[in-house]
Image (cartoon, rainbow, N blue to C red):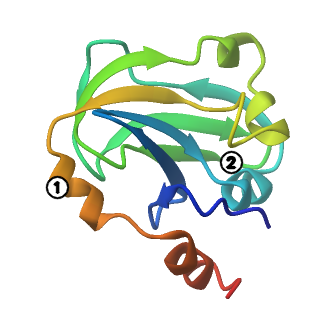
Amino acid sequence: MHIPENLKYTREHEWVKIEGDVAIIGITDFAQSELSDIVHVELPTVGQEVTQFEPCGTIEAVKTVADLYSPLSGEVIEVNEELETEPGLINNDPYGQGWLFKLRLKDPEEIKNLLSAEDYRKHIGEA
């Protein structure tokens, strides 16, 4: 299972890459593997305010529909529009082309509530 060291994680299996006051968000390799073939993604809209650990969208796979949670609070500034026509990008490249959305951080202190790669490995039983 691929778990990049330079990212932060949630217990709901989202990853976060911090770049200044912007967070790039996706779901982990573990999550996409558990969901299997992803067929549709409902993302938050640009300009929407999201709250840490609150639902902000859904991910539909062949097996189930899962809620998508925002790992941090802030304003959505960009969504990955390629996922509308190619949701399988999440399965093929969860940490690259399969990113979900970007948000401008409202409270950078919330980053402290996220898991390190090591903590996430323990959470999914890979440590």
Q: Is residue 66 above or below residue 97?
A: below
Q: Is residue 45 left or right of residue 109?
A: right
Task: Say which quadrant the C terminus sits in.
Answer: bottom right
Q: Is residue 88 above or below residue 3?
A: above
Name which of mark 1 and mark 2 comes first in the sequence: 2
Q: Is residue 114 above or below residue 85?
A: below
Residue at the farthest front position: 20
Q: Residue at x 37, y 15 (%)?
A: 45
Residue type at mark 2: give it.
Answer: Thr
Percent x, y of residue 36: 82, 49
- Where disc 2 sits, the SS reads loop
Label 1: how many Cα within 10 Å (few below 14, some 14–19, many 20+):
few
Q: Nearer the viewer, mark 1 or mark 2?
A: 1
Task: Kindly identify which numbered label has been placed on residue 119.
Answer: none
Percent x, y of residue 106: 16, 36
Q: Is residue 24 left or right of residue 77?
A: right
What is the CA distance from the residue labelled 1 to the residue labelled 2?
A: 33 Å
Percent x, y of residue 119: 50, 79
Q: Residue at x 54, y 59 (%)?
A: 13
Task: Kindly identify which numbered label has been placed on residue 64.
Answer: 2
Task: Say which quadrant the N terminus sits in.
Answer: bottom right
Residue for badge 1: 109
Residue 38 sits in quarter: top right
Percent x, y of residue 40: 68, 26
Residue type at mark 1: give it.
Answer: Glu
